[in-house]
Image (spheres, rainbow, N blue to C red):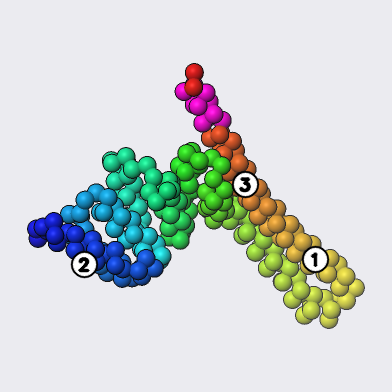
Amino acid sequence: MHFLPANRLRLYRNFKALEATDFYGIIRFYERFEEGVRALELEAFFECTLAYTNALFETSQYGKHLVMCDFLLELIIEHNIDRWGGEDIFTKILFDKAVSHVYQREYARAAHVTREILKIRPNDPSSARLLKKSLLRQKPKWLLHARAWFMLFVFLSAATVAVQIFVIQTFFSDYDLIAQYVYYGFLGLGLSILLFAEWRHTWLSNHRVNSFKKQMLARNLARDKQAFQ
């Protein structure tokens, strides 16, 4: 279909008439008239596509949102779009893309994207928090092994209680106190392993984020000094 200038103007005007919070309406409009939207001038096309991408995010259509984020990032790089609406649009889209990866449970990809933001803005607190969250959601094998050991010791403590009630208290009452010690020992050991493993995982995640931020700050400072010289 060929869109004449008057038709393109009407299309853009109808899009602008939509409420900014009518996310489903924006999605329906864009997908129905996508060919016409692509025929718009760059600025209008980018505005419509950005609104559509944000609407996908707001309606939890994260798979589609990720596809559109990649498209917008390519568009930004190709046309050297620096700021949009007074904000750094490149890092904003990267951040939204990382959040979508988190909702999709793609934590390694979310961490990768968030690191790319921190390379540009090492002091961005939202990106640092998102990176920590992404790292925490990735469960290393040693943590899963620790949880397995915890479950084993919980099972042993439960088995000890069963033996104590049905066997020891009936036939070997002299060993009742020892059975209690064994129960508390198994339970305490399991909890100690679990708590230490969870604490170590949290500490390592925070340490990795802080170390990466310091690395990027030092790199950017060295680059700025070199550019100044």
Question: Is residue 220 in the magenta section?
Answer: yes
Answer few, some or many: residues within 10 Å of disc 2's Cα (few below 14, many 20 plus, some between 14 and 19): few
Residue at the spot of label 2:
32
Amino acid type at mark 2: Arg
Label 2 element class: helix
Q: Position of residue 44 (x, y in %)?
A: 26, 54
Please state the horizontal and vertical placement of residue 119, each as a whole percent of the image.
48, 38
Numbered mark located on residue 206 in the image: 3
Residue at 80%, 65% (x, y): give it. Answer: 184
Q: Is residue 67 magenta?
A: no
Query: On the picture, is 160 further left or further right than 145?
Result: right
Q: Is residue 63 visible?
A: no
Q: Residue at x 31, y 55 (%)?
A: 47
Q: Earlier in the sequence, mark 2 or mark 3?
A: 2
Q: Residues within 10 Å of mark 3 (few under 14, many from 20)?
A: some
Within 10 Å of the Cα at label 1, are there few (<14), some (14-19), or many (20+) other Cα atoms?
A: some
Where residue 21 sits in the image (x, y, percent)?
Answer: 39, 68
Residue 171 coordinates in the image, percent (x, y): 84, 79
Cα distance between the residues tagged 3 and 1: 32 Å
Residue depicted at x 33% and y 56%: 50
Q: Earlier in the sequence, mark 1 or mark 2?
A: 2
